[in-house]
Image (tube, rainbow, N blue to C red):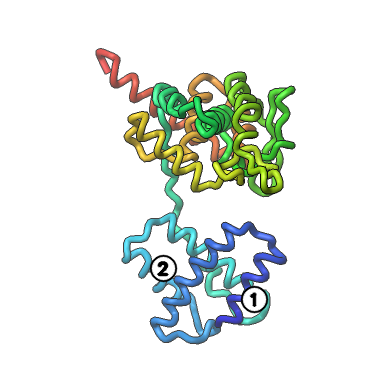
Amino acid sequence: MKEQVESYFAYLENEKRLSYNTIISYERDLTHFHHYLDKNHMNSIQKVDRYDLLTFLESLRDSGKADNTLIRMISSLRSYFKYLSQEEIIQTDPMQYIDPPRKQKSLPKIISLEEMEDLLAMPDVSTPLGIRDRAVLEVMYATGMRISEMINLSLEDLYLGMDFIQVLGKGSRERMIPLGSIAKEWLRNYLDNARPLLIDKNTQEVPHVFLNYRGQSLSRQGVWKNIKKMAQEAGITDNISPHTLRHSFASHIIESGADVRVVQELLGHSDISSTQIYTKLSKERLTEEYNKYHPRS
């Protein structure tokens, strides 16, 4: 079965042109699945039927896996067996009559305006790295961009004279996001006074906007660690991540009256249902505040 798996991943990379992270996710799921087959002495993929797949999925549920994990596994297996069927490696696709559990949409975690102000005040702006961290926080909160979009931001994507940033989002879709005056001020401060000091003079200049202390592109892990550390220093007890800033951006501007369609465009959501969850969150927060402060609630 090793050759079939290898040819499948070559297909995903070269023909489907899926992202590296998506392929890694599929690889992790199929490795788990094939370990299960080996453990149960099932050495031929052609003999795997619907009952075998249901038994495997049930074993995941019995081990305590969440519905979202099962949904992702089913998606991975569906893609895999569809490929095997197309290549006539198997006669029938045993996944075609297996439905995933209904995905439970959990409300995103956000922080309050007061907590956001405390977080923004944390970087030590007397140092180049502190100015960089303040600029990172301000830009992420001002634009709602994803962490991957932020770390891949290049100098050519900045249109500060027009108060816009160009972002390359999911599916290679470009969008222009307005940049507020405060975020623009900190970004200019970083570009003029901090970034030149972070550039490694011994190597070719990196085109990305945000750099680490070695003059290389800032990594996803680096941003996550910095935000987690600053949140703890700010006394924020919730376990937040860079995506918390994106959620907070969307929730705060919807609470302030922004149209959900505008927020959808800013976030780069292809489906408005992904954006409408912030409307629900805003209503829940409104009810919470009402119940907390109204004398007859």
Is residue 142 among what the camera can see? yes
Q: Nearer the viewer, residue 29 or 156?
A: 156
- Camera-near label (2 vs 1) is 1
Mark 1: which secondary structure? Answer: helix
Query: Which residue appears at 53% of the width and 74% of the height?
Result: 94
- The numbered disc on residue 7 is 1
Is residue 250 among what the camera can see? no
Up/down of 75 relative to 146, above or below: below
User: Is residue 159 found left or right of 43 in the rendered image?
Assistant: right
Query: Which residue appears at 70% of the width and 36% of the height?
Result: 155
Q: Position of residue 35 (x, y in %)?
A: 44, 77
Q: Quadrant of residue 173?
A: top right
Q: What is the quadrant of the C terminus in the image? A: top left
Up/down of 50 relative to 98, above or below: below
Mark 2: which secondary structure? Answer: helix
Up/down of 285 relative to 147, above or below: above
Residue density around tag 1, few if under 14, some if 14–19, many if 20 or more, within 10 Å: few
Q: Given contact means CB atoms under 8 Å apart, are the residues at marks 2 and 1 in contact?
A: no
Q: Quadrant of residue 195?
A: top right
Residue sticking out furthest to the top:
295
Q: Which residue matches tag 2?
A: 57
Q: Quadrant of residue 167?
A: top right
| Amino acid type assigned to the residue bearing label 2 in the image | Leu
Q: Position of residue 295 (x, y in %)?
A: 25, 13
User: Is residue 52 found left or right of 271 in the rendered image?
Assistant: left
> First in sequence: mark 2 or mark 1?
1
Query: Which residue appears at 40% of the width and 22% of the height?
Result: 114
Query: Which residue appears at 49% of the width and 36% of the height?
Result: 277
Q: Position of residue 103 (x, y in %)?
A: 45, 51
Up/down of 39 relative to 242, above or below: below
| Amino acid type assigned to the residue bearing label 1 in the image | Ser
Q: Nearer the viewer, residue 47 or 234?
A: 234
